[in-house]
Amino acid sequence: MGLTEYERESTFKTSVTFTSGSTNVDPSGNIAYVDVYKSDGTLLWTAASKSGTRSASGQYYYYISTQSTDPLGVYVIDWYGNFDYGGQWSYMPKHEKYEVRVRYAD
């Protein structure tokens, strides 16, 4: 199965669904963060200033823009939020990562 591809210098939508079993669940404070790593391993941006928009229970999205100076290749999108695992663990981050390919425009 191939990676989803997007053209460099475009804007695309990334989304995530957090679940517990088969039920959608929201992270603490309904805040889902997203970090995007470029193909060279550097951050396109970090969650310190980027959080997704909640569209439904456990579902979040964010629009990502790339510039002409950003490298081509595989980008890693890391969504995460804090969830209450109970007991000695209490609140801890849960990550959902996936990859997309950024390529030249046709």
Image (tube, rainbow, N blue to C red):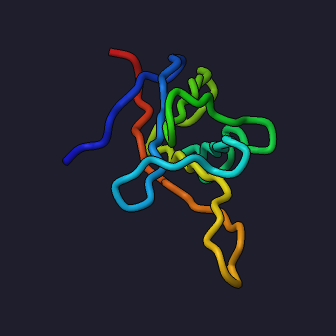
Outermost residue, bottom side = 88
Q: Does residue 82 appear to the left or right of 65 in the view shown?
A: right
Q: How many marks?
A: 0
Residue 96 image position (x, y, % from top left)? 49, 54
Q: Nearer the viewer, residue 78 or 61?
A: 61
Foreground pick, 63 / 67: 63
Q: Is residue 103 above or below residue 2?
A: above
Residue at figure coordinates x 67%, y 81% from the top left: 87
Residue drawn at the location 62% of the way across and 28% of the way down: 53
Which of the image's four quarters has the C terminus? top left
Locate residue 4: give its quadrant: top left
Tell me where residue 100 appears, x and y as whole percent.
41, 40
Residue in the image at 30% along x and 42% along y:
3
Residue found at x 67% / y 38%: 44
Q: For the view shown, which residue lies furthest in the right direction?
A: 48
Residue 27 x, y percent position in the rendering: 63, 50
| Residue 7 appears left or right of 40 | left
User: Taking 22 as reference, is 29 above or below it?
Assistant: above
